Image (cartoon, rainbow, N blue to C red):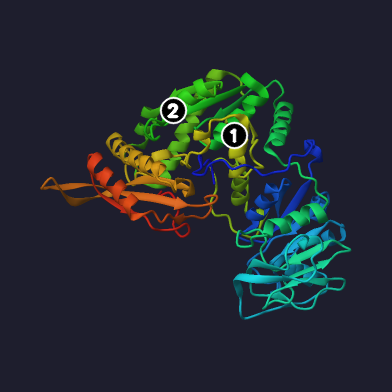
């Protein structure tokens, strides 16, 4: 998830405790070892929501790497511990004395490594189950005896390792939770991190605060203080340049770096000619008047459109836009003078998804903001948001005073409308798409369910079709509507919009946008489709 720009959700309250500030080098940390679960990132987010900093590491992490953690969580995963060559961990970790919580596959792995048994079952237990708590202390402290939980497993623990006791069971699973209280090693067969386990957050809270002796401290106010100190130490008297797109990630990056070093930070906004209607003017107004930054604006629309003339291949479009941006950016940087650092809005999911070594899952795609601009520009790279998830970036932006209407905007791709026009990019086709997209945004923003939407936009298709308007035959463009729901953009589902809303959007586009006589609705999910069409 690259510079997604914006979110369709209002900024939530963090709900974090407000403890004393801990210096950066003393920050208490929970580590998650990733065994390939689709929920691994969710575990880390839940821990952070409870006020404790959390990082994800590959299951291959060494004991030396994890020895200073306050606690360790082993994620679930798609493999079976009964198979040869299944993912395991550095067994020296088990002797460190660090509290450990194994979830699903993580619990089964603990049982296997510590001398218990894991059984293969033909009947997979998937979906809701009722957990009956047998031992209410420690992990289940304060919870009622019967709890709804979410199961997703085939294998299950048979005989417990020596020193372990049963903590809870379900109708189909005797070892739904286990523990060795003396060694502070716990396992749960269900997933406490998902919303389908309503008391899961309390279970994780017990692991953090009762078992791992965490105190909290992961707040955006503290993160700002830490980051400002770190940026000042790193930059010294040097200069930093930021590529400002107007999206959440780059805007918060610029604001944070600006908070740290003032006019030593130079933000550069490149108008590439493929932005949405009035977006360039909005960015100018925002960052010169409402939230002033040390900002340079480069109007390069003509240059980009000339470079894109006649190009229809989507990858070629991206490469042209990327190369042209680098050229323009380098030119503007040269005008500023000697620049020492480039600040980028790389987020934690970008890093996880782009670097497959973090876990057994294959890399889905590379991200344009992971790894920096070409080394030939001679900048050192700083990534002040690299530890944060998207929702945390929005809270950080709010803490920095960035207007909510920017922080609440939906994601917008780096190549802009160029990847929402299937086929050649021309000024007339851009005008059609901008007008259609404006209708989509107006109607969705007025709809009461807007905050449930991750992205909503129009796509101009490379086909024309026959229609009838005013008793005359037309042969005009088709527009596709793409509206999806998502938590983080890694997966997405098409939004079930009311028929009346779809009808109004279609009617307005056909009646108000000259050159369009047909509107279709995209009902594909990610995967197998992507959110953007190109």
**The disc label shown at residue 397, or none:** 1
Task: Place residue 161 in its image quadrant.
Answer: bottom right
Specify whether 211 is left or right of 497: right
Query: Mark 1 or 2 closer to N-term?
Result: 2
In the picture of the structure, the residue carrying the numbered disc 2 is 282
- Percent position of residue 179, x then y: 81, 67
**Residue 316 versus residue 118: which sits nearer the camera?**
118
> Does dot 1 land on a helix, a strand or a loop?
helix
Which residue is depicted at the point 87% across and 60% down?
95
Q: CA distance from mark 1 to mark 2?
A: 18 Å
**Residue 62 versus residue 263: which sits nearer the camera?**
263
Residue farthest left in this picture: 471
- Percent position of residue 240, x then y: 62, 25
- Percent position of residue 102, x then y: 74, 63
Task: Place residue 379 in its image quadrant.
Answer: top right
Which residue is depicted at the point 70% across and 51% down?
47
Residue farthest front in this picture: 144
**Tag count:** 2
**Residue 245 versus residue 423: which sits nearer the camera?**
245
Which residue is depicted at the point 75% across and 78% down?
158
Specify whether 473 is left or right of 159: left
> Does dot 2 land on a helix, a strand or a loop?
helix
Specify whether 128 is left or right of 308: right
Residue 116 vertical position relative to residue 200 in the rendered view, above or below: below
**The disc label shown at residue 448, or none:** none
Which residue is depicted at the point 29% across and 51% down?
503
- Percent position of residue 472, x then y: 11, 47
Residue 59 visible in the displayed image: no
Specify whether 233 is left or right of 506: right
Residue farthest right in this picture: 182
Residue 190 vertical position relative to residue 237 in the rendered view, above or below: below
* Badge 2: residue crowd in 10 Å (few <14, some 14–19, many ≥20): few
């Amino acid at each position: 998830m690259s510079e997604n720009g914006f979110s369709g959700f209002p900024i939530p309250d963090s709900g974090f405790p407000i403890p004393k500030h801990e210096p950066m080098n003393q920050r208490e940390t929970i580590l998650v070892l990733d065994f390939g679960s689709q929920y691994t990132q969710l575990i880390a987010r839940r821990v952070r929501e409870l006020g404790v900093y959390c990082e994800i590491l590959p299951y291959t992490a060494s004991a030396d790497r994890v020895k200073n953690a306050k606690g360790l969580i082993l994620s679930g995963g798609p493999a079976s511990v009964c198979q040869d060559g299944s993912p395991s961990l550095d067994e020296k970790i088990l002797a460190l004395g660090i509290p450990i919580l194994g979830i699903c596959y993580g619990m089964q792995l603990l049982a296997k490594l510590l001398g218990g048994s894991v059984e293969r079952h033909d009947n997979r237990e998937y979906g809701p189950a009722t957990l009956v708590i047998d031992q209410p202390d420690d992990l289940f402290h304060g919870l009622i005896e019967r709890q709804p939980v979410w199961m997703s497993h085939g294998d299950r623990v048979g005989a417990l390792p020596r020193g372990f006791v049963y903590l809870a069971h379900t109708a189909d699973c005797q070892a739904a939770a286990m523990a060795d209280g003396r060694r502070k090693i716990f396992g749960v067969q269900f997933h406490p991190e998902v919303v389908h386990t309503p008391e899961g957050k309390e279970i994780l809270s017990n692991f953090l605060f009762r078992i791992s002796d965490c105190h909290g401290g992961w707040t955006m106010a503290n993160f700002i203080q830490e980051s400002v100190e770190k940026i000042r130490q790193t930059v010294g008297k040097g200069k930093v340049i930021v590529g400002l797109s107007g999206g959440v990630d780059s805007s918060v990056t610029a604001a944070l770096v600006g908070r740290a070093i003032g006019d030593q930070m130079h933000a550069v906004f490149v108008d590439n000619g493929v932005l949405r209607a009035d977006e360039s003017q909005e960015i100018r107004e925002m960052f010169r008047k409402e939230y002033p930054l040390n900002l340079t604006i480069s109007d390069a629309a003509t240059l980009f459109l000339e470079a894109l003339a006649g190009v229809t291949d989507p990858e070629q479009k991206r490469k042209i836009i990327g190369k042209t941006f680098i050229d323009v950016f380098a030119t503007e940087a040269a005008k500023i003078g000697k620049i020492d650092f480039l600040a980028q809005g790389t987020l934690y999911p970008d890093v996880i998804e782009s670097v497959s070594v973090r876990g057994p899952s294959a890399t889905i795609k590379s991200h344009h903001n992971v790894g920096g601009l070409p080394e030939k520009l001679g900048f050192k790279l700083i990534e002040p948001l690299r530890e944060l998830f998207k929702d945390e970036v929005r809270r950080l932006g709010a803490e920095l005073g960035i207007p909510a209407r920017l922080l609440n905007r939906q994601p917008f791709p780096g190549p802009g409308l160029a990847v929402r026009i299937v086929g050649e990019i021309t000024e007339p086709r851009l005008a059609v798409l901008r007008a259609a997209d404006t209708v989509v945004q107006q109607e969705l923003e007025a709809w009461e369910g807007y905050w449930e939407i991750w992205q909503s936009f129009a796509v101009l298709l490379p086909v024309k079709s026959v229609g009838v308007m005013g008793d005359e035959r037309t042969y005009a463009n088709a527009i596709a509507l793409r509206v999806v729901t998502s938590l983080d953009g890694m997966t997405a589902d098409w939004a079930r919009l009311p028929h009346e809303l779809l009808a109004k959007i279609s009617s307005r586009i056909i009646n108000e946008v000259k050159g369009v006589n047909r509107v279709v609705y995209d009902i594909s999910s990610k995967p197998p489709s992507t959110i953007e069409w190109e």
